[in-house]
Structures are given as structure tokens and as C-alpha cells.
Image (cartoon, rainbow, N blue to C red):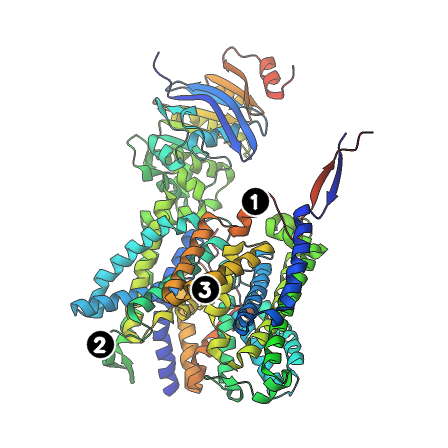
Amino acid sequence: MRQYGVSRSSSAAKVAAVLGAVILIVLIAAPWWAGRADMRLMGELFLYLALASLWNLMAGYAGLVSVGQQAYVGFGGYILFALTIFGELPPIVAIAGAGVLGALISIPVATLIFRLRGAYFAIGTWVIAEVFRLTFAQVSSLGGGSGSSLPVGIVRSLASSRSGRESLAYWMALGAVVVVIASVYLFLRSRRGLALTAIRDNELAAGSLGIDIWRIKFVVYVVTAALTSMIGALIFLQKLRISPEAAFSVNDWTAFVIFIVVIGGIGTLEGPIIGTLIFFALRETLADLGTVYLMVLGAVAIVVMLKAPNGVWGYIAARYNVQLFPLGYRVTTEVPQKD
Amino acid sequence: MDWVNTIVQGTLLGGLYALFAAGLSLIFGVMRLVNIAHGDFIVLAAYLGLTVVMSTGIHPLLALILVAPTMAAIGYVLQRGILNKTLGDDILPPLLVTFGLSVILQNLFLEGYSADPQKMDAGVLETASVGVAGLSLGVLPLLTFAIAVAVIAGLQYMFFRTSLGRAFRAVSDNQEIAQLMGLNKRHIFGLAMALALAVTAVAGILLGIRTSFDPTAGGARLIYGFEAVIIGGLGNLWGTLAGGVILGVAQTVGAKIDPGWQLLSGHIAFLVVLAIRPQGLFPRVSG
Amino acid sequence: MPDPILKLTQLDAHYGDFQALYSLDMTLSEGDVIAVIGSNGAGKSTLMRSISGLMSNASDQVIYRGAPIGGMRADEVAALGIALVPEGRQLFPSLSVEENLLIGRRLQRAGPWDLRKVFDLFPVLEERRAYPSTALSGGQQQMVAIGRALMSNPDLILFDEISLGLAPVIIKSIYEALPDIVGEGMSAVIVEQDINKALSVASRVYCLMEGRVTLESDTETVSRNAISAAYFGIE
């Protein structure tokens, strides 16, 4: 007689967890083994991965497809500048402040744009980003249309030496992406996360089970806005300069993020990780081609969406029935030992 | 009098925005598809017009004779080749595919024409004006508005009085049953996209005459068209015209208060309508 | 004996992993009317979808006038002369009564049916021609659905549960009109829950249960008991 059990994990997940811990330790130690350029690259990769994981949570799980997340990236950046320059807050506190304010402003925004559905919602998010951009371009104390630089004193307050600042920037990026992925993972494992997965799979059925769809989507939107704002603050802390065009760039903060998630695999936690790696590999090899590189990116995204809509990870997961982040429930069978 | 002039200018501007929106509205009405690259197609028409004008020297408005059929053909091929495969219940595929198209188009423009702003020269048309009721109105804006009205009237006629329009409405209502009636939906969708891009061609040429454009101009055009549709109400082309006018007036009034406020005023008007009457001003609920 | 106009050979139909029809065999001679009866879920609508092309099957499992059409799309099948009056009427809400009928004419096949003839058959539709189709009663909508199918001048017409949701007196009047509809050599398959009505107009009857044919007989000689047994699966 077989015995059946239900478990959340699998051997692949356990292996991945161990491997992940090892990789994390190696990454933490990077300031001692990696060069300056490599550390900058990795830092940038971490921040993109964080943005991608957040976009994936909204679009792949909550069904909220936004082409306007640059609103919060830019918002976070500008709030960082405002809080450190005018509020004279230490940068770390300002980053947290950016998160809180990002959450607060996302509430009235959500109330407005949730009146739109589907693709119209998407364009609505873009309009909001434009409103943010135009509004901040009017604020002359933050540089108006041409932007401003972060004062040297604030930069120095982070750490006294340049290598100290670079290590700190790297660790903050690493910390940010770990926090984001961990938060998303824990959220998806929770009851609310289960509800979200149900919504992703079949919204109508989920609603009929009594799941308050709009409340959950609202919460996801606000939390994503908060975390995205914090990432934005981090990004511009490192760039040391902000302008409306750079802060609210559709290409940088939305197009690339979307491509990462689509190519990697939407609706999975592993997808954005794969996608970010592929994106950076492509960028390092092809970016010299300029516009051609971007056209290739666009074409790849189209082909992936038409032929393999679940992305690279989706293909692997389906083919080999594997899941590295233990999110599902598996039925296990054990044949009891014969004496 | 100044304010009257501002409002009239805004109204005429609304005609252009309505043209931006008409193609978008048509496609959504027939196949529930929102084309994120719509603005970039407007710009494509402008660049095509520029190419024709530069190589043949004919007047930009005449270039329409070449550009409109070209855009229609592009639309048909695009729909049957790529976009038909994205249609279905999931909103992600059409959104992401058209987003990818947008990126490709913008970079194509960059490759072909560099990032410099371009403009088509319509000669006397651009500066001529007529006096109407004490106001001096530009001929080009008047013509644009008249064309917008004509295009929308033409589309309405097509939709409600022709066999093709019946086919569009039937396929939009119920794809399966339309197939039973012998309608090949893939072909019908292709025709709808062809028509939408032909209308977009008109919008693009008029845009290219009126202001300068560059590879990244598409995003803003998509947004204006979208706002006109939402303000006016889904499913109603005349409503879209009204929406365009309201948007145009909001922009010109805002600009009069402070030039830097022009675009922001338009967005604010959109947000206000979204807040107090989200279904739009003249919605026609379709099945 | 001339070839049958429609021949189903070992017809299988699947919805994903679920199999709805199992090796169905069915024959229809030209000019004949057959009835297909069965309880809910027996596979009757799946059968209609398969024949009309809404559902794709193996090419040679559906033979029409000797040609395999199992894999064809619905619009291709319609062009060959097969029309379906779908379950639940399914009129186009954005179109008026007249426009719904005109849609049927799109195929431009030759034949006696046109707007005039449909209005002669169902005069109430002529009064309501400009109304939106959704403004009509259930029975009138059924008339529009039938008229719409007739407008394409089909050689084979499929009726999927036309009595569903209609009052008995309306059902009666529609069935009384059926001989006019199916006159002049048109072949028909009538899927019905109302067994009596179905048997009254058909020359042969098939009974389906769980995707299989449980009874095949001509309507003159079939017995009530045989039908009950086949319908409910009682041994």
C-alpha cells in the first residue's frame, strides 16, 4: 500500500537553497575579490533584478500590468534628493523615507487608475508617470527640467573613502535585492500569496471563492510602489545626479524590466533571476551595436511572447517539473518498508 | 476675446487628438486589442511622409496618397502575421508584443533618421489664416479639424451602413458565431488593422506638418489618443472627438496660464474625468 | 443508392484531456432529416460543433459530399453549405434583427432564401426588423437565428436545441414551420431534448449517451422502451 503525503519542498529546492546560501556568502564577500567595475556591474544587476521581481509580482501574479513603474523609481530618487538636501536626513533614513512616501502617494494613484482595466490600466500607469515627470520638472529647487547633483557632503557622509562608499553601495544593492526577493517569496508562501496565485490562475474562480480580489491587488500595488521607490532612491544615490528624463525614463525602468521578466519567465520567482542574467549577458556583448541591440531585444521579447510565453524558466520548469523556490504543494508517495 | 481664441485653438487641436484616438478606438472596438505602439505608428506615418516628400518633392498632403495605402498594407500584414496570434483572454501577450514593436519602431527611426527633430513643410498652408467672427484662425488647424470630423463621419458610416461594418460588429460581438456565418475572423481583423493604420496615416501626416517630431514622439501621441478615448467614453467615435476637444482645450488653457503647464493640464483634465466619471462622458456600452 | 450527404466515421472529440465523443458513426442521406437525442452532457452539442467546424477533428472523420472536412475551420465549412443554428440562439447584440439576417447572406450562395422569404416565413420579424436583436422575445430570437442560418442557402442545416427555454406554444409554431424550412431538398440534423418534437419531423433518430451512439433507428418503427433504455442507459 502506498502512503501519500503533502510537502512544500522538493529535492531540487533543497539543493537550490544550499547553493543559494553559498552564492550569497560569495557575493557578500565581493568587495574583497571583485574589481571596481565588476562590483558596479553586479550592483546594477542586483537593482534591476529587484525591479524585475517587483514588476513580476504585480504583472505575473496580481495581473496588474504596469508600463509606468518609472513613476516610483523617479519618485524615490527625487525624494532621496529632497530628504537629504532639504531634510538633512542621512541617506539611509532618506531611502526608508522614500519607501514610506512612495507607499503614501501610491494610494490615491491606485484609487484613480484602478478604475481602468487591462491594457487601459497599463496606459493609465504611463500617464501617471508622465504626470510625476512633468510635476518634478516644475520643481526648480530640485533642478527643474535639467536636474541636479547630489551635494558632495551627503556623498561623503556615507563613508569616508571611495572604496568604502563603493563597497557600501554594493552591499546596499545586494541587501535590497535579497530583501525584495525574500519579501516576495514569503508573501507568496503566505495565505495572501496563495490567494494571489489563485487570482493569477483564474480570477473568476478565485472571486467566487470569496477572495477579495481588488483589496489584494491594491495591497500589492502599494507595497510594490514602496519597494520600487526605495530601489529608485538607491539607484540615484549611486548615480549621484538626477533629472526628470533620467528619473522617469520609460526605456531604462520599464522596457528593460519588462524584457527581463518576459524572457526569463513571468509568474515565477526564478524567472526574473534568469532574465536578468540573460539581459546583462546580452548587454555586455551587444550594447556596442546601439539601436540594433535594442531592436534585437524587442524582437526577442516578441518571439518569446509568441512562441514560449512562459519564458526560459517556464520552459525549463515545465519540461523538468522543477521548482527552485518551494512555493507549490507536492504530493509525495512513499512505499512503506517491507520487514 | 483672448480666452475665446484660446478655447477655439484648443478645440481645433482636439481634432488632431481625435485623429490620434480614432485608430486606437477602432481596434479596441473590433478586437479588444490595445496597441501600445499606436503612437509610434503615427510617427511612422510622419517619417514615411517625410521620406516621400524628400524624394519626390510633392506636397506633404499629397504624400498621403502613397503613405495611407502603405500603412494599410503594413497593418494587414502585421495583424495576420503577428498580432492575430496574441488575441485571446490574456491581456499580457498583445500588450507585451506591441510594446516590443514600439521599441523596434523607435530604434528603426533612430537608425533611419537620427534623433534630430524633423518636420514636413506644407508651404503656405502652415501660415495662412482666415478671419472668422473677429478671430484669426489658422487654415491648417481648421483643415485638421474638418478632416477629423470627416474621418469620424466616414468611420461611423462604414460601421453602421456597410457590409464590412456589419462584419466588424459581428466579429466583435461573437467571434465563434461570426465564423459560422462564413466570416474569416483573421481576415476581418487584418482589414480592421489596415483601416486603423490608414486613419493613423492621416493623423501622422497632419502631425508632421504641424509640429516637429522625433523617434521618441510616439509615446506622447499614444497617451493623448488614449486620454481622448477615455474622456469621451468607450465605444463612441463622436465621443472620442469630444474627448479630444476637451483635452485640447485643457492644454491650451493651461498653456495660457503658464507655458510649462500645457501638458500637465491635459493630464489633470484626464485624471479629473477618471475620478468623477470613469466611464467617460458619452460612453456607449457595447455587448 | 446515392452517397450520403454527411457521413461521420469513428468520430472522436476531445476538450483537452476530456473525451466527449467516442468513435461515433452516423449517416445522413440527402434531403433527409435526422434527430439526435440524449440527456445533458451526452455529447450532442459537441457533435454539432464538430460537424460545423467550431471544433477541429481528424480530417476523415467528417465526410461531406465525399470530401473530408473534419479539420476545416468553421468559416470554410459554412462556405461549403453547412449552416448551424447554435444552441442558445447567440444573435449578435450589436446588430439589429435585419442586420443579423443580412450577416447570413455574406456567403452569397445561390438559393431560394433571401430576406423576403424569411420575412414571409416569420412575419413578426419584418415588423421588428430595425430592433436590436436583444429586444426580442426568446421565440422571436429563435426565428432570427433560424432565418440567419437560412440566408446562407445551406444544403445541410443543423439545429442545436431550438426548443430550449421556449414556451410550448412557441415551440409548436416553430416546429410547424419546419417542413417549410426543410423543404426543397435541404438536409437537416435536429438535436433536441424534446423527444416528441424531434421524432415528429425526423425520419431517423440517433440517441447519444456519454459520447456514444446507444440507439439508431428510423422513427416509424422505434419503440418508446427502446428510446428510454438508450436515453437513460437502463439495461
Q: Callout 1 environment at 10 Å: few (<14), some (14 to 19), or many (20+)?
A: few
Residue A174 visible in the shown view: yes
What number is the disc on residue B125? Answer: 2
Q: Amino acid at mark 2?
A: Leu
- Answer with left or right where residue C71 lies relative to residue A265: left
Which residue in the structure is indicated by mark 1? A318
In primary-sequence order, the first of circles 3 and 1 is 3
Residue at the spot x=21%, y=61% of the render? B65
Q: Which residue is mark 3?
A: A283
Looking at the rendered structure, which numbered label has been put on residue A22?
A: none
- In three-dimensional space, the C-alpha distance between marks 1 and 2, rounded to whole angstroms, equals 61 Å
Residue type highlighted by circle 3: Arg
Q: CA distance from mark 2 to mark 3?
A: 47 Å
- Nearer to us: label 1 or label 2: 1
- Judging from the image, mark 1 belongs to the subunit labelled A
Local SS, label 1: helix
Q: Chain of mark 3?
A: A
Across and down, in percent, residue C14 comes to 52, 31
Of the residues shown, which amino acid type is indicated by label 1? Ala
**Secondary structure at numbered mark 2:** helix
Q: Position of residue A287 (x, y in %)?
A: 42, 66
Q: Quadrant of residue A222?
A: bottom right
Tell me residue A66's x, y (percent): 53, 63
Seen in the image, is B88 located left or right of residue A198?
left
Residue B254 falls in which quadrant of the image? bottom left
- Which residue is located at x 44 percent, y 84 percent? B260
